[in-house]
Amino acid sequence: MDETYAWYGDDFCVVEHTAGGDVVGEFMGLPGNGKRVEFRVLHVYEFKDGTITRENVWMDGAAISAQLMAPVSPSAGQADDQPVAKPAHFNASPGTEALIRAGLA
């Protein structure tokens, strides 16, 4: 995982990561077929007396699903990797770009 952002306080820590991997089985009922996916993960930690008292982890399941449902290019046998046209100020996650390609966003 690559750390994207981190916020810290006296009793908390929030870390955003970009993660990726090959989906060899199923994810949320969708076949992985060995496709490579990238997605965001958010960790939220709470601390008390120097120990972690709570941890929450969220991952961008919609981004993963969109990448698994993206059309497969017949020549390459992989999902369409063409960049999505977007304004310079728009910073979409790979999953959001897959949604745009699939016409779902």
Image: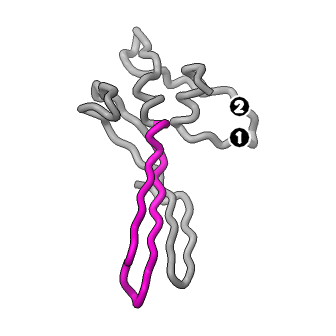
Quarter of the image containing the C terminus? Answer: top right
User: Which secondary structure, mark 2?
Assistant: loop
Amino acid identity at mark 2: Lys
Q: Is residue 50 left or right of residue 100?
A: left
Q: Residue at x 40, y 90 (%)?
A: 49
Q: Is residue 20 above or below residue 46?
A: above
Residue 30: which quarter of the image?
A: top left
Q: Residue at x 75, y 34 (%)?
A: 87
Q: Residue at x 55, y 20 (%)?
A: 102
Image disc number at residue 90: 1
Q: Residue furthest left?
A: 25
Quarter of the image containing the N terminus? Answer: bottom left
Q: Residue furthest bottom?
A: 49
Which range of residues does the magenta coloring cover? Answer: 39-63
Name the spot of residue 10 as percent of width and height, x first. 54, 84
Magenta-drawn stretch, dominant element (helix, strand or loop): strand
Residue 54 falls within the magenta-colored stretch: yes
Q: Is residue 102 left or right of residue 22?
A: right
Count neighbours of disc 1 (C-alpha within 10 A) and say few if under 14, some if 14 to 19, many if 20 or more. few
Asked if the residues shown at circle 1 and circle 2 are in contact, with their CB atoms under 8 angstroms apart, the answer is yes
Image disc number at residue 86: 2
CA gap between label 1 and label 2 equals 6 Å
Q: Residue at x 40, y 67 (%)?
A: 55
